[in-house]
Image: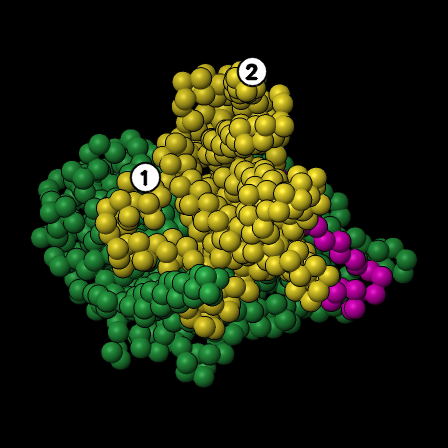
Chain colours: A yellow, B green
Amino acid sequence: MSKNYNKLIKYTFFKLSLIPLSLLIISSLVFILLRVAPGDPVDAILGSGANDIAREALRTKLGLNESILSQYFNYLEKLIHFDLGKSLSNQEPVINIIRNSLPASLELGFISIIIAILIGLPIGYLGLKNKNKKADYISRIFGISTYAIPPFWGAMMAQLIFSVILKIFPIGGRFPIYQQSTNITGFIIFDSIFKNNFLALQGALYHIALPSLTLGFLLSGIFSRSFRLNLEKSYSSQYVDAAICRGIDNRNILLNYAIPNALLPILTISGVTLASLAGGALLIEVTFSWPGIALRLQEAITQRDYNLVQGIVLVTSFLIVSLNLLVDILIAFFDPRIEY
Amino acid sequence: MFKSKRINTFTVSTICIFLTLFQYSCKTNNPLKRITVASSGKINSIDPARANTLKALQLISSLGDTLYELDNNGELIPKLASKMPVISKDKLKISISLKTNILFHDGTSFDSKAMKFTIERFQRIGTNNYILDKKIKSIETPNKSTLIINLNKPTSSLEGLLTSVNLTAISPSFYKNHYDTFLNNDFAGTGEYVLKSFSNEVQILDPNLNYWDLKPKNQGINFIGYSNSSSLYGALKSKQIDVLLSNSIDDTQRKDLNFLSRKKQIKEGISNPTEVSFITLRTNIEPLNKKEIRLAISKTINREEISKNVSYGLRDPSKSIVPQIFKGDNLVSWPKYSPKEAIKILKEEGFCDGKTLNLPLTYRSNVPTDKLIALYWKKDVQAYMEDCLSISINGVESTTIYKNLSEGLYTAVILDWTGSYSDPEAYLFPLLSCNKLDKHICNQGESVYSGSFWGSEKIEKLFLEGQNSYGNERLKILLNIERLASEEIPYIPIWVSSQKAWSQKNISKPVFNGAGRLLMGDLEIINE
């Protein structure tokens, strides 16, 4: 076992050592792609009306008059000092913008995954329990259709039904405008609980309910399908047969033999999904005006805000790489069969 | 038994959560009787020197005052100035008397030094400072209530510039650490509202209890932003907001809101037209370098039908590149729709009967109406222009178009323009002026940046004359400029657009000032 841990630690260090290299490649690619794309921040800020002198003046002010190579080295130099620069459109430090918007995306992503698991796993289980019966077919159709629904359409339908027609949930935003939010970490739900502010907690839950239910619902299909398949595989394995022969009752077999093994792939899926959601669920954020990192990234791309795009991509890449590594470690920890 | 108990617990918990949420949703009905105004997008900065989006300018105009303002008839009226500006005989000095006893939100007094600070700061760091274009030589403050602006050369548009929201008076003491940098998230002006809190998505305004003019009729404004027009539309319909203010809302939704307002379910307020949409023709290449070809093309655009089919008749067809309000009894008219005449001209120019003139038309792919205009025009040309003219359309993202306009990449492109300040010159100059001319081809200047590459010495002379003239004389010169342009057709005007706002039944009808800004202070709850 200790040998395994040693291997795992070695593997972790190896993966960790690759993170800076991955980030360097990603940031360089983003830097180049942004400059190659037509249009620049000056055009986005000034539109078509400004003259050459005004454009040149703004270009100089933003440091865009320097050669691309010089801009690149400046960027790398700042990056080494953990300085992501300032937003070109409003001169606000990029790190502040990320600090304000990333918690919104993480909060939404985390709650959505919990909802997806809460919906997906029971449906997958019910499907397998009633194999080849009506409930199984419904569960399969549910799994495929939720996965197939385009997120923007699903979000708009949810908004139309629950916000406009039934008026149960707010149409968008993250917090009621009538209240002052409690902001310590940026995770409003956590902050409200931490500050014992029940009203703020209620407001935050009320606003996150529809986006997270929608996203959770859309993600639940993959969990239900995957759980059903893996549970079925577990049930047909030799260790379950052995347990049955030993006279262990069905409930124990399910809880102690089948589910733990079926959950390992779910852990991988959850990790990958959470990692992808760390970069924000763009279409959900746009539809529900959720002030997350994906919405910021979309705005920054439209405004050709090079520094902000580079900063957001770099931070979210770091999160994605880190979360993937964490999932790898967790799987290795829980599954002794895995070797590195 | 165990199973059913668990199910019961789960059911009860779920019901409890939903009850809590329902209870909350019932409770969120405007406890402070503030008015919630929603618009699209977010505000990056409320620094007057930085702001250049309609939304930011709208907010700043509620938080601050300019020296002058345009009323609903387009007439200049003094705001922080006490009377109309006095211009010296050599037209190089403008004296402006200022109102006294006006306080900034931070409690300091408004005076000539504050105004000097505001203008100089904008000249120094303003994103749109090119609108001043070295017009101002120096600013003097002989006393607290007099501001003297010395000009480098005579200019008549400065009065119009002084209505620009970018020159909203700000408190020097509040901005003392931001003389060279933007202050994006705070504001201290003299306006009817005080900024209570600011985030990119939500801004909360309280009435300014020390306001020098008429106080707001409401108890405050919550100004919020949604990231798409469906949310805005849904929020108004589900009564989650009181007022919807947006120019970027889809035309189908505008139509529906217009229908609801006619049924008196909501109220609709419309500003004077401020934005003009047009097609720029690149005049420095064949065959568009020929006036006759441009004339023929301009005669194929059916503005009335485009307005009816694309905007459901909610945008006014325009045969001018300057919104009507600023021109009084303007008689300038760009070529009318007449496909028969267009065919005749094109035949005379050697097209038709097997030789088709192909016009590549570019539209901004992120502006839905542009695509519909392009599609409608293409279809119309196919139907009525026989084999004389065909249009091939291509969508490009707006920022890319702006970048490439001056490179001359687009033969014809659909654009729009809103003047930086409320004056005909703010529309004519950016579209028609030229610094370096070779006959009618402009090699350097504004018309290069607008993609037409067209210029005229006559027009340049008239611009100069206009700088030295005032009042009706100046208006005549500006009309003459447009008349000359309408004969040469470097652009094809399509329509003019107005700002629109819709309010719930229990809120007063939204009213705009002459520059197209919603008067937030006039919004009131009328049926509690």
Residue A22 appears in which quarter of the rendering? top right
| Chain-order first, disc 1 or disc 2 | 2
What residue is shown at x 14% (from left), y 46% (from top)? B106
Residue named by callout 1: A185
Q: Nearer the viewer, mark 1 or mark 2?
A: 2
Q: Which residue is mark 2?
A: A3
Whether residue B463 is situated above or below residue A206 in the rendered picture = above
> Residue B82, image x and y in percent?
17, 56
Near mark 1 (Cα within 10 A), the count class, few <14, some 14-19 or many ≥20, is few
Q: Secondary structure at mark 2?
A: helix
Three-letter code, disc 2: Lys
The verdict on residue B393 being magenta is yes
Q: Could you tell whether B311 is left or right of B150 in the image?
A: right
The segment highlighted magenta reads B379-405
Residue displayed at 41% across by 27% down: A85
Please provide percent x and percent y for residue B364.
61, 51
Q: Residue furthest right?
A: B354
Q: Nearer the viewer, residue B394 or B261?
A: B261
User: Do callouts 1 and 2 point to residues on the same chain?
Assistant: yes
Amino acid carrying mark 1 in the image:
Thr
